[in-house]
Amino acid sequence: MIILPAIDIINGQPVRLYQGDYAQKEVVADSVRSLAQRFVDEGTCFLHLVDLDGAKAGRRVNAALIKEVAKTVGVPIEVGGGIRTLEDIADYIENGVERVILGTGAMEDATLLQEAVHRYGAQIAVGIDCKDGYACGRGWLSQSDLHYIDFAKQLEAMGVQTIIVTDISKDGTLQGPNMEMLQELKQAVRMHIIASGGVRDLTHIAALKKLDIYGAITGKAVVCGTLDLPAAIALCEEG
């Protein structure tokens, strides 16, 4: 299992939200660049960046900053938020982004997703952001009638290899991941699953590792100091 420290971006600043609420925004570092460098210095092998302005607006807002980080940080990054066209995807990949995450775009435009997977294969991931078991889009502000298991199965049939799964009710709470949801998903599909939301400490990392999922995203726990990033990385590398 790998650890992917998260950097959520609003107005060019690294922030954390609580349960996806844009009104509950906390700036967590001096800059996106400095926070990314801190994570790299602590040993991370992959970064997770989200353009929250872009997710809400339906277009990339912080793309220039994200591309700068991708070119300079020295480790692979995956990016989501506001990505709605093949041109958006190509621009990120051509500027050093390792994996592009489609969220609303995947939910609302099957043709876009199919073409993206055809062109870029494993470099395309899909974010499944859930509230009460149903997928949400547009920066978590719009809930669909698409159940997360059904959505995941559809994505697998289309050739998607990696999904990022977030229980919105857990995000930013430090109350632990939704292990039941992740277990059900693990039994339903064979894709790489990256868990996001709720991680507080090493016990949660150990539980996710035991579940044998591909990766775990952590944001608030690291910046708040409840999770030691080097220790989490070391735990994932054991065995």
Image (spheres, grey):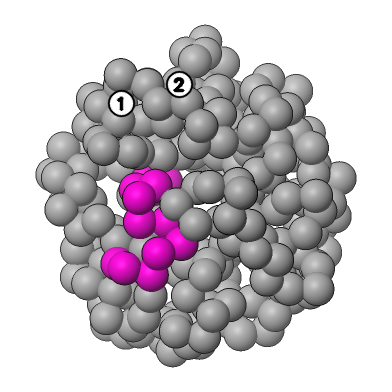
Q: Is residue 55 left or right of residue 163?
A: right
Mark linked to residue 178: none
Q: Is residue 176 visible?
A: yes
Mark linked to residue 151: 1
Question: Label 2: how many residues lie within 10 Å, few (<14), some (14-19) or many (20+)?
Answer: many
On screen, residue 77 above or below 228? above
Q: Quadrant of the N terminus?
A: bottom left
The secondary structure that most of the magenta stretch takes on is loop
| Residue drawn where x is 35% and y is 38% of the image | 130
Which residue type carries mark 2?
Met
| Residue drawn where x is 54% and y is 80% of the image | 224
Circles 1 and 2 in contact, beta carbons < 8 Å: yes
Residue found farthest to the front = 23
Q: How far from the left and from the top, in percent, is residue 119?
A: 59, 24
Q: How far from the left and from the top, in percent, is residue 70?
A: 76, 56
Which residue type carries mark 1?
Phe
Q: Which segment did they paint magenta?
A: 157-176
Question: Label 1: how many residues lie within 10 Å, few (<14), some (14-19) or many (20+)?
Answer: some
The residue singled out by tag 2 in the image is 107
The picture quadrant where one finds residue 133 is top left
The picture quadrant where one finds residue 52 is top right
Q: How far from the left and from the top, in percent, is residue 19?
A: 45, 52
Residue found farthest to the top = 111
Q: How far from the left and from the top, in percent, is residue 44?
A: 57, 75
Q: Nearer the viewer, residue 180 or 169?
A: 169
Assess whether residue 161 is covered by the magenta stretch. Answer: yes
